[in-house]
Image (spheres, rainbow, N blue to C red):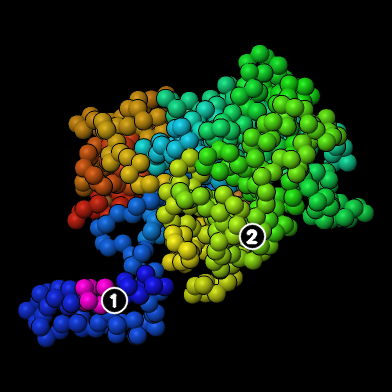
Amino acid sequence: MTSGRKWWRWAASALLPLALACTRETGPEGAATAGASALGGGSSLAELMQKRGLNEADVVAALKTYTPSGKHDEYYLFASGGHGGNLIVIGVPSMRILKYIGVFTPEPWQGYGYGDQTMELLKQGSRDGKMLTWGDMHHPALSESAGEYDGQYLFVNDKANPRVAVVSLRDFATTQIVASELIESEHGSTFVTPDTDYVIETSQYPAPLGGRYADVTKFNDEYRGATIFWKFDRARGRIVPEESWAMELPPYMQDLADAGKLVSDGYVFINSINTERAYGGNLEGNPPLESGVSQNDMDYLHVINWKKAEQVVKAGRTKVIAGMRVIALETAVAEGLLHFVPEPKSPHGVDVTPDGKDIVVGGKLDTHATVFSFEKIKALIAANTFVGKDPYGVPILPFQEAIRGQCEIGLGPLHTQFDNEGFAYTSVFIESKVAKWSLKDLKLVDKLSTHYNIGHLVAAEGDTVSPDGRFLVAMNKWAIDRFAPVGPLLPQNFQLIDPVGPKMQMLYDAPIPLGEPHYAQMIKADKIKPVEIYKPAGMNALTHEKDPFAVEGGKERIERKPDGVHVYMTAVRSHFTPDIIRVKQGDTVHLHITNIEQAKDATHGFTVGSQNIHVSLEPGKHANVTFVADKPGVYPMYCTEFCSALHLEMAGYFLVEPK
Ligand code: RUQ
Ligand code: CUA
């Protein structure tokens, strides 16, 4: 703590007189109140520390996170909202929540799921024709160029209803949801290849591919896993399902994945559990699923050569299942696209090092991080050095020859992140700790306790080819005693950690009250350049093009057409035009509303009472809303954002005349 002490001496000599001087200048009674008012009831830094029971380390931690009013954060943290289904955007180091982004779950503030465009988007994400209004989001992935986050897009998955969503970082809004009916659940998702050619989504719980039925006792023969390579068209900002493809996998439970980079570019690594192929049945004389799954000491790290697989797809050596081109397992084996390496013990996280040379695997029931060498794996494959085959003919490489070594880090290692100085940071679930270890000599250098049961952890730019080595966030599953009690359902706890120096330092606890945010990625803030308004006015936020129904000021009107009543409206401080709408009972109503303002933050919201309608109209945005006016009555409509002094007056009447 020498540096801390030095800081303290410096603070005492420099900061305090400064603070006092400022206080003195604040008001006419400055001299009299000096030291009493500015610190909110405290008087001096020392006194304040004493009053609040803070020690020197607390103050150092506070100064590392405190971000004065008006100052922006250095990083964006994009955190999954777990079974809340939506994304959370957080500033680091302040840990201030900046935004939620509606993705799989309707989000009323943004009007997400309460107007035509966003309803259309949620419908895109239907599976088997069923409209889904929630998702179990796990792993956000930022788009990459040459292995660096480029700040353009973000992809997220839904484990429960296998889907992938595209979020545009131009306006922090969801623009696409794709669902394949090939698989029935997923988890190893989303991970991008280094230039975002593909977004990878891998199944978790095996099932007959394509939504077929087969009894679970036919598990070994009929059930399969699959990994989907969703083709991303960066210029259009869209996943192109027709150009996407998949590879069939044995019925193990494939888990997390990571794409190779630099030397290992062209490969993807997916780990698995349940090579036992257990499927439960604890009322049918079988062991419960979890014990059946955990018999073997080793499961299989899947090594997939996706660049070679892409050629096999281009050559047409696929079958079509649920509308998707799939490389059959036999083909994958015959073409040498898939190899296995044994991995210990209930593996969970798999993370490729920034240089692309090593693959770090954490085993939930292990005490090591196991470091596989890509070079060794490649050489073993080239020399056909196999110790055997799995029941589906997939060649298995020898474990000892494939690893560079293991680092003893503690019980229950899960996920690993990296810094710019050759250190790896692994979450240790059972011990509730972060372990910092050296990649070079595989030696543990430091351990820090977290509260409690850390799952993922994320480092600044931590999945890129050049991590920043700045902040680390532990994403803890339980919050037990961390915050004021809020009933039986507790928030999760993000803990901000300073990883720099010989001793990691815990800086800040941030409760996250929106589902379980499994994973997050942290990107340098200056890489993201969102638009401030939609320009020109009348823009459809989904297509980023002018909406065909966009309305110009002066052209507002109401038209009765065969398909219903079309209302062309504008919003501008502080009125909607028209502000009276008359329809007849049973009419289908099409509202076309453009916020024609182009001033930053001049956002309006629009609702008609009792119709389950709400849209957010950011400056320049156009929204369409369709509904049936089925009940006669008088319905006030109003602006839901306090947009001006006359906001309350920004209202009108929607009148439904009885038949
Ligand atoms: S995970 S359970 Cu990423 Cu560790 Cu989903
Ligand atoms: Cu517009 Cu309030």
Q: Position of residue 520 (x, y in %)?
A: 50, 50
> Contact, CB < 8 Å: mark 2 with mark 1?
no
Above-or-below relation of 441 to 495: above
Which of 507 and 114 lies nearest the eye of the viewer?
507
> On the rendered image, what quadrant is the C terminus found in?
top left
Whether residue 10 is in magenta: the answer is: yes
Element class at badge 2: loop
Determine which residue is flagged by label 2: 409
Tell me where residue 235 sits by quadrant: top left
Please report the residue visible at 28 percent of the width from the left and 79 percent of the height from the top.
Answer: 45
Element class at badge 1: helix
Relative placement, left or right, of 387 versus 633 is: right
Q: Position of residue 551 (x, y in %)?
A: 28, 31
Please report the residue visible at 41 percent of the width from the left and 33 percent of the height from the top.
Answer: 542
Relative placement, left or right, of 46 versus 565 is: left
Determine which residue is flagged by label 1: 9
Residue 379 appears anywhere in the view:
yes
Image disc number at residue 91: none
Relative placement, left or right, of 322 versus 598 is: right
Please report the residue visible at 88 percent of the width from the left and 41 percent of the height from the top.
Answer: 217
Residue 224 appears anywhere in the view:
no
Mark 2 nearby-residue class (10 Å; few <14, some 14–19, many ≥20): many
Q: Which residues are magenta?
A: 9-16
What distance separates the C-alpha of mark 2 from that of mark 1?
Answer: 36 Å
